[in-house]
Image (tube, rainbow, N blue to C red):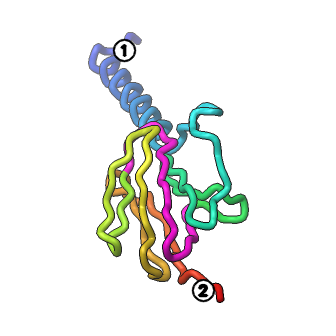
């Protein structure tokens, strides 16, 4: 039995839609930048640190700190570097901070007051969020 032209077109549409969906999922969640595509990692200094932003994560350069859980002190200057393949935002509503960072770009945020736990989100990607804790800086005598 020979398939009708309708069945051939229907099968092509289904296969095409499947490939498109798979491509979007890989692009959104599975992109891993090539080694060496971001600036050299440095340890956070006493006056701040760096947060790497990628597809669905925010992470510090601290192996003991899990992704999407950021810790800083009052007065820190924090660099958010987009190591991903698509633009992201760094949005911190409690500080009226909202910056778009394209791949390879950096946004600088000054934690000018202690605030406990606050949300950091990407407005472009629902679910792309982190919790950032800004603790009071210990006073030295």
Q: Is residue 20 magenta?
A: no
Q: Secondary structure at mark 2?
A: loop
Q: Residue furthest top?
A: 2
Residue 105: quarter of image: top left
Determine whether label 1 and label 2 are within 8 Å by CB. no
The percent position of residue 4, horizontal first and vertical second, equals 31, 15
Instruction: Give the foreground label among 1 and 2.
Output: 2
Vertically, is 7 above or below 89?
Answer: above
Q: Which residues are magenta?
A: 68-88
Q: Which mark is residue 123?
A: none
Q: Nearer the viewer, residue 140 or 102?
A: 140
Which of the two labelled residues, at mark 1 and mark 2, occupies the earlier sequence position?
Answer: 1
Vertically, is 138 above or below 126?
Answer: below
Whole-angstrom CA distance, mark 1 to mark 2, is 79 Å
Q: Residue furthest front?
A: 141
Q: Disc 1 designates what residue? A: 3
Left or right of residue 65: residue 24: left
Q: Disc 2 designates what residue? A: 139
Residue 103: quarter of image: top left
Q: Nearer the viewer, residue 25 or 102?
A: 102
Vertically, is 56 above or below 22?
Answer: below
> Which residue: 54% across, 80% down?
135
> Which residue: 34% across, 17% down?
8
Q: Quadrant of the C terminus?
A: bottom right
Local packing at callout 1 (Cα closer than 10 Å; few below 14, some 14-19, many 20+) is few
Q: Nearer the viewer, residue 40 or 131?
A: 40
The percent position of residue 101, horizontal first and vertical second, equals 38, 46
> Which residue: 41% across, 12% down?
1
Q: Secondary structure at mark 1?
A: loop
Left or right of residue 76: residue 108: left
Left or right of residue 11: residue 64: right
């Amino acid at each position: 039995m020979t398939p009708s032209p309708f069945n051939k077109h229907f099968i092509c549409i289904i296969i095409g839609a499947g490939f498109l969906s798979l491509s979007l999922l890989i692009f959104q969640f599975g992109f891993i930048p090539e080694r060496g595509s971001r600036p050299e990692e440095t340890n956070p200094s006493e006056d701040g640190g760096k947060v790497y932003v990628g597809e669905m994560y925010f992470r510090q350069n601290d192996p003991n700190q899990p992704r999407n859980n950021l810790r800083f002190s009052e007065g820190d200057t924090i660099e958010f570097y987009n190591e991903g393949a698509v633009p992201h935002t760094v949005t911190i509503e409690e500080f009226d901070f909202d910056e778009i960072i394209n791949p390879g770009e950096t946004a600088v945020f000054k934690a000018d007051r202690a605030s406990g736990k606050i949300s950091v989100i990407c407005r472009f990607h629902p679910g792309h969020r982190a919790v950032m804790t800004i603790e009071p800086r210990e006073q030295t005598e």
